[in-house]
Image (tube, grey):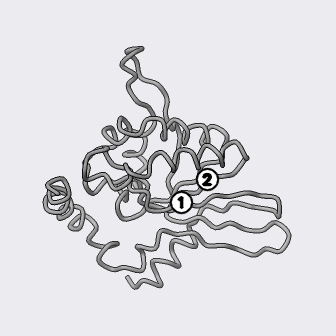
């Protein structure tokens, strides 16, 4: 399938969000939240990210994450990422509870394309202090794309991660993930 066909398919199946002149959105992409190890490229920016996210939350913004929010090429599971950046995920949960969180999957978190994976790993977490599972994102849905549509003018803004235009990263993402996991991450940790 060609890049244009993949992008057209993403556009056709995109989540539609209406907006007005007074709507407020913040767009983030490629955060690559990791496990807070030396290989975690997000770790050095987590404090400023959290404070920015807190500011936008207080100001009533909607948060759109345009893919690769979680670094799931270097990590097999979401849980170590959650433990490393629990405050960030708790804040994203607040956005979600107010229907202000809109998520797109990218090539590094393409496993979120599978609703069963999302339900198993993101709906709840184990809270050791209370010794029970607690809701995290519950019924969250990840999308391949989002279209923001102005209510008055009908103007549309197409939001997508962009890996659809890269044949290798869209088709062979599992191979790329394997190479990052067994080669790149150990090199990053080593220094």
Mark 1, Cα crowd under 10 Å, few <14 / some 14-19 / many 20+, is some
Quarter location, residue 31 = bottom left
Whole-percent x and y of residue 63? 61, 53
Between 39 and 146, the residue placed more toward the observer is 39
**Image quarter of the N terminus:** bottom left
Q: Which residue lies at the image location 70% right of the left edge and 74% below the top edge?
A: 156
Q: Earlier in the sequence, mark 2 or mark 1?
A: 1
> Eyeballing the image, is 164 above or below 96?
below
Which residue is at 46% across, 36% downward?
Answer: 123
Q: CA distance from mark 2 to mark 1?
A: 8 Å
Q: In the shown orientation, is residue 81 left or right of residue 38?
A: right
Residue, far right: 152
The x, y position of residue 32, in whole percent, is 38, 56
Q: How many labels, in total?
A: 2
Coordinates of residue 83 in the picture (x, y in percent): 36, 35
The answer to whether mark 2 and mark 1 are in CB contact below 8 A is yes
* Residue 172 shown left or right of residue 55 in the figure: left
Residue 63, numbered label: 2
Taking the image as shown, residue 107 lies to the left or right of residue 92, namely: left
Question: 6 or 36, which lies in front?
Answer: 36
Camera-nearest residue between 107 and 34: 34
- Judging by the rendered image, the residue that carries numbered circle 1 is 28
**Image coordinates for residue 104, horizontal then vertical, percent:** 50, 59
Residue displayed at 58% across by 72% down: 12
Q: Secondary structure at mark 1?
A: strand
Determine crowd level at label 2: few under 14, some 14-19, many 20+ residues with C-alpha closer than 10 A: many
Badge 2 marks a residue whose secondary structure is strand
Check the picture and name the quadrant holding the C terminus.
Answer: bottom left
Residue beneath the point at 46% across and 61% down: 67
Q: Which mark is residue 99?
A: none
């Amino acid at each position: 399938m060609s890049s244009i066909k993949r992008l057209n398919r993403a556009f056709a199946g995109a989540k539609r969000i209406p907006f007005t002149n007074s709507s407020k959105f913040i767009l983030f992409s490629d955060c690559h939240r990791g496990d807070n190890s030396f290989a975690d490229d997000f770790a050095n920016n987590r404090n400023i990210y959290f404070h920015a996210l807190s500011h936008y939350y207080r100001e009533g913004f909607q948060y759109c994450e345009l893919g690769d929010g979680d670094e799931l090429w270097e990590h097999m599971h979401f849980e170590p990422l959650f433990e490393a950046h629990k405050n960030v995920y708790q804040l994203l949960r607040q956005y979600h509870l107010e229907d202000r969180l809109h998520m797109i999957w990218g090539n590094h978190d393409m496993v979120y394309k599978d609703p069963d994976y999302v339900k198993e790993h993101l709906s709840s977490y184990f809270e050791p202090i209370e010794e029970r599972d607690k809701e995290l994102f519950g019924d969250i849905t990840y999308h391949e794309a989002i279209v923001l549509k102005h209510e008055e003018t009908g103007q549309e803004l197409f939001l997508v991660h962009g890996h659809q235009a890269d044949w290798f990263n869209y088709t062979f993402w599992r191979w790329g993930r394997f190479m990052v996991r067994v080669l790149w991450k150990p090199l990053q940790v080593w220094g």
